[in-house]
Amino acid sequence: MLSRVADSLYWMSRYLERAEHTTRLLDVNLNLMLDESSTSSDHRWLRLLQALGKPRRIKWSGDPYELARTLTFDTENKSSVLSCIIRARENSRHVREQISTEQWHRLNSLYLEVTRSELQTAMHAQALQGSSETPAAFLQQVMEAVHQFQGVTDSTMSHGEGWHFIQVGRYLERATATAILLEAYHEDVWAQPDRVPEGNEYLEWMGLLRSATAFEAYCKVYTADLTPERILEFLLLDAEFPHSVRFSIDSLQCALLAIQSASGGNRAEELHRISGRLSASLAFASVDEILNGDVVAYLRNIQKQCQAVHETIYHLYVDYSIQTALAG
Amino acid sequence: MKVSGGLKQLGLRQFPYTETSMDNISTEATAGPLELAALKNYKLDHAYDEMFASPDALHEHYEPLLEHFAALPPEEVQRRKQAADLSFLNQGITFTVYGRDEGTERIFPYDLLPRIITAAEWAKVERGLTQRITALNLFLKDIYNEGRILKDNVVPRELVYSCPQFRRQMSGLQVPRNVYIAVCGTDLIRLENGDFAVLEDNLRVPSGVSYMLTNRRVMKRIFPQLFRSYNVRPIEHYTQVLLGTLRSLAPEGRPEPNIVLLSPGVFNSAYFEHAYLARQMGIELVEGRDLVVHDNICYMRTTSGLRRVDVIYRRVDDDFIDPLSFRADSILGVAGLFNAYRAGNVTLANAFGTGVADDKALYAYVPDIIKYYLGEDEILPNVKTFLCSIEKERKYVLANLDKLVVKAVGESGGYGMLIGPQSSAKERAEFADKINANPRNYIAQPTISFSRAPCLIGDELEPRHVDLRPYVLYGDKVTIVPGGLTRVALKRGSLVVNSSQGGGSKDTWVLSQ
């Protein structure tokens, strides 16, 4: 497979995952703020920005709907939902002949839908009037479209090298995003382990789980009894839940191995080593140990290792020098 | 000549009533009022009409089409038209409009009514095009090698050497199978007498073939029964033939050649077509940055390392293909590609320097070229062409600017043209200056009213000017799939069919008998 194609598939997938993540966080918080809550509005929205990796040039102005609008539609902002969808679609356009027609249709219709100018005007007007219905419906629509895209990807595209690069992009993005999300909630949830939770704090914990679509899955494992340790254990170390960091890293590892065998190279030792180490460290970790140590440092270390995986993929498959390739 | 009315029209064509008087028919005709309404703006003029043989009679092969169409209620016609448009948009069958950030893609306007060509007409076109591409290919081989035709003064030496598309770098180079033009899309028009003539040879990187293929696919979906009843010759094998052509041109000793399509990238107006063709042929679509040349061997960068490339179907112009040999500021090309080509390690289709043979001034000599190499008269005539580089002809052109169409020899896509009868005195004065400043750069042709075919405009049928671009493939043999891209000048009275200038297209049906 062409390096450029792998690159485009990878980014298409990452951008879509990012769009979905941002959308879900907005949806959860726009919903939660309607309830009476122990968390002040300022705190909630600053935490949201932190959970999105503090996008540059976005300031909290005091108006949640304005912020939601910026994070959704502002194309000046590279990580807004709209920017992500435009770039995902642009990447898919570069590899139009590599993806299935169904994939293209799904992504292209999403793009056509979100770039309709009336939609943005409507959203803006609604935001000014403080009505939350339209954003919720819209955000829901984006999430569904992304899920559908993943569905058609799995059922219409050959599960070959290209498909595996899509998996790599998705899970690497997801692992990173979940680690950043957990870091943003550290202060509220895990910083003081012995504190007795106040009145509505449970709502915020639920919000955290929902931000990773994890609430129902959590309840199946631990019942609706929410505790900070279990939440961390579930989002970080659960082996079966698709949004947990461990699951994401395991899936990433699988996809990388498949790519390695498809591209027939044994040049991948370094990549295999760092992704395997990350995967193993999550498999054998215990939540108590993590909580006894420095949680933030632990989460940052995961982010750093994800970054290292990304860079190694690049050196290996996309950005290699001709001399190395001819020698090998 | 004005058609007196659609109802009479349709009544008259129903043999044996042809001889009865007009009045009788308008009262007795069985045709519904819709037919009258749909044709009320259909006015004939001196241009050849694809549908009407005379004001009183249709060409026989258009009768079932008009009947079928007339039987559909207008809402149904509109519904099908929308279905077709939507199908193009959703498939992303679009072309890029330069100069805007967002919404840069538009669908190529599509007309619902097919253009129909009879088996006999097509047979002549096929023979004519085969003859032409064979001769032009021999011409290219000759001028880049011994130059016999120049020594014999059949084609003026200075005309060839002054052409910006003439590539010195190609001199003495042996190309595989001696095929310079592997893919060509010749623009044909129909003269007032109904004969096809060649307007332009496109020998560099002709585009539009994907529209030919997708038009057909949409048409079969929108009018299945009508299509079936017509016995139309299939065109769907084009991509297989193209692949076979490319394979036959592989360098020697490469039995399983790796063939790629080189595109300038997603911002090119024809990107959709590049992606479409690559997908249909199952070959890699590459951009300049995917290829590297090392020791005169061309590779592409893949996830499993470098892989050798043997044949490049290139859709990048000569100028941009190799910054070391041609334009140094090109970022679309591959450094060193020309040397790899010269060394015979990779084949490019089309070869470099084919543009010299579709120069608009050289065009005037094509009949002589055919005669010189093949000893035959041309089967498809040229359009009368005046060369401004010849003093006598330039004088004539300058004196008759208001009657002629003036074209810059190097331009395409409908740019750099003066259409005399539709021009202002100021425009003519400007062009006269340009011609005097650089006579070699201009040619002139009489304003030809090329043929018109019925198009659906709103709810009605109106005639619009059309041309025809069949696609010729030349590998181990010449193959022309029966059909081509019929382009339509959608503006009433307009003679410009280019997509960048408000043109559209139609499906082209070549009948099997």
Image: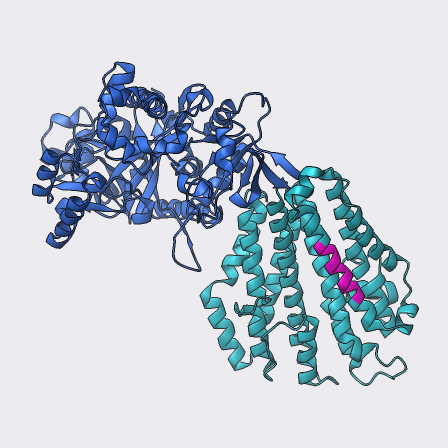
Chain colours: A cyan, B blue
The percent position of residue B458, horizontal first and vertical second, equals 29, 49
Which range is magenta?
A: A301-311
Horizontal side, residue A69 vs residue B232: left or right? right
The single residue placed furthest to the top in the displayed view is B375
Q: Is residue B120 visible?
A: no
Q: Along the line of sight, which residue is nearer the eye, B491 or A280?
A: A280
**Picture coordinates of residue A175, whole percent (x, y):** 75, 61
Instruction: Kindly report the secondary structure that dominates the magenta region of the rendered protein.
Output: helix
Indicate the quadrant where residue A57 lies.
bottom right
- Quarter where residue B512 is shown: top left
Above or below residue B364? Residue A262 is below
Indicate whether residue B66 is drawn in magenta.
Answer: no
Q: Is residue B379 above or below residue B56?
A: above
Question: Is B388 in front, or is B510?
Answer: B388
Front-most of B207 and B463?
B207
Q: Residue at x 55, y 42 (%)?
A: A97
Tell me if residue B6 comes above or below residue B191 in the rendering: below
Specify whether B369 is left or right of B265: left
Residue A310 is a magenta residue: yes
The quadrant in which the C terminus of chain B is found is top left
If the image is split into quadrants, where does the N terminus of chain B sit? Answer: top left
Which residue is the extreme one toward the left?
A: B399
Q: Nearer the viewer, residue B117 or A11?
A: A11
